[in-house]
Amino acid sequence: MMSVVCNEGEETVAYIKGAPVEIINKCTHVLDLNLEVRELDDKTRQQIISVNDNYALSALRVIALAYKKVPNIDRKFELPGQVYDSSNIENNMIFTGLSAMQDPPRTEVEDAIKICRKAGIKVVMITGDYGLTAESIARKIGLINTTQAKIITGADLEKADENELMELLKTDEVIFARVNPEHKLRIAQTFKKMGEIVAMTGDGVNDSPALKAADIGIAMGISGTDVARESADMILTDDNFASIVNAIEEGRSIFDNIRRFITYFQTSNVAEMIPFLLMVFMKIPLPLTLMQILTIDLVTDQVPALALGIEKPEPGIMDKPPRRKKEPLLNWKMILRAYIFLGPLAAFIGLFGFFFKYHQFGWHFGMDMRVFGTDNPASMVYIAATTMTLTGIVMAQIGNAFACKTTTQSVFKTGFFTNKLLIWSIAAMIVLQALIVYVPFLNNFFATSAITVKDWLVLAAFIPTLFLLDELRKLIIRTVIKRKTLRSALIN
């Protein structure tokens, strides 16, 4: 690691510390327990290496210490032959002993490693430590479980070409020990060539190239250098590996919440679109006016959609493999759910209210809706029917909000009231709709009219219908996934 030259009285002494094997190779003598210097023979070398290995197997980090006396130097002048460097200092040293220290891993790291395995995240240890020390720590945190771990040293890396390194990186349980920053950079670059998304951690100045090369460079906020922090994309303020795993979970949750937000909005868009299609193809009056469409998009839908954006992570979110790098935000599963399933259900509820109100006024199938009720100067039938369509879609969006709380898990399991903002937003949506229906000034503005309590109850009955049908869809998906997982386990 380093050597220093010190003046001690009339003598000049060089002290050196570093990796035990490297230090021993630079020593020719040893200071024994009697404080006597004797020649370092092969037997003593093996004893020292054996002690070092025992320390390493106990997950201790070990450094060796040595010294030697060197010719005096006049520090006032730089005379020829008296400039000290590693080539004329770090040789023929006297070995003094080993220093073992312990830097125990945090207790939460083992659980974090298990979560990574479930989530399809490959964790690779890249360290400058001695191989046995690295292996012992890896076993302690659950990174290595096999009896024979594959330990690759920096020297092994230098001998391996790109294809050989790719094969090594495909190994499930591999440790890179005694590596330097150049090796770390090469590993990051090779992972990227293999199509992997690479997150690299580091704290030293020499780690900055690897942090830059990775897709996500993560610097240590406490022990990290300024250069490492400047090179990184993210700074870990507590230097805790488990916090990285928590960040991954939070990132997945945010991505899912964006999809919930979009699904919720797209459902109401389909419910608004289908009435227009019916007007064109079935020659009926427009069941929803343009002002009422704006009411849904800009008033009643806004707060519940925002509330879905802060939904807590869905149970099992870290049991799924990482999504593909180029996977679009709006995928075919979302399209099918919003446009083929939830959207038509919401449209049905709204249109049911439209036809239900016409039926209350005496209309029945076979009669021309375009002329029915036109003898009323205020077109009371049509206004009341469009009000029912608007209210029906609002009721459908309440059921849709609860349905969108989860993607595959049952809301009965996760809980209906875990998102307080969503509950308050639904209450606000109902109040806003009531104001639009019953306040005369808003009646004129939104082209609505008052409806009866019976009308509200009829439409409100569809709220659990939409929600429960989506729960059935989720149950089918969970059953299919469980069978696929079981089949895969049996094959393996």
Image: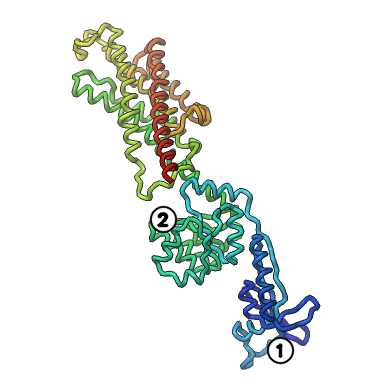
Cβ–Cβ under 8 Å for marks 2 and 1: no
Of residue 290 and residue 56, the one placed in the foreground of this image is 56
Report the amino acid beneath label 1: Asn
Residue 305 shows in this picture: no
Q: Secondary structure at mark 2?
A: loop
Identity of the residue drawn at 33% across and 28% down: 343
Q: Residue furthest right?
A: 34
What is the spatial separation of the Cα atoms under label 2 and label 1, in whole angstroms?
56 Å
Crowdedness near tag 2: few (<14), some (14–19) or many (≥20) residues, C-alpha within 10 Å: some
Q: Is residue 186 above or below residue 282?
A: below
Of residue 314 and residue 284, the one placed in the foreground of this image is 314
Find disc 2 in the rendering and name its residue.
Answer: 196
Q: Residue furthest front?
A: 491
Please indicate whether residue 274 sits to the left or right of residue 154 in the image. Answer: left
Q: Which quadrant holds residue 166?
A: bottom left
Find disc 1 in the rendering and name its residue.
Answer: 72
Identity of the residue drawn at 41% across and 23% down: 468
Total marks placed = 2
Q: Which mark is residue 395?
A: none
Q: Position of residue 213 (x, y in %)?
A: 44, 62
Q: Is residue 376 above or below residue 22?
A: above
Q: Which quadrant holds residue 398?
A: top left
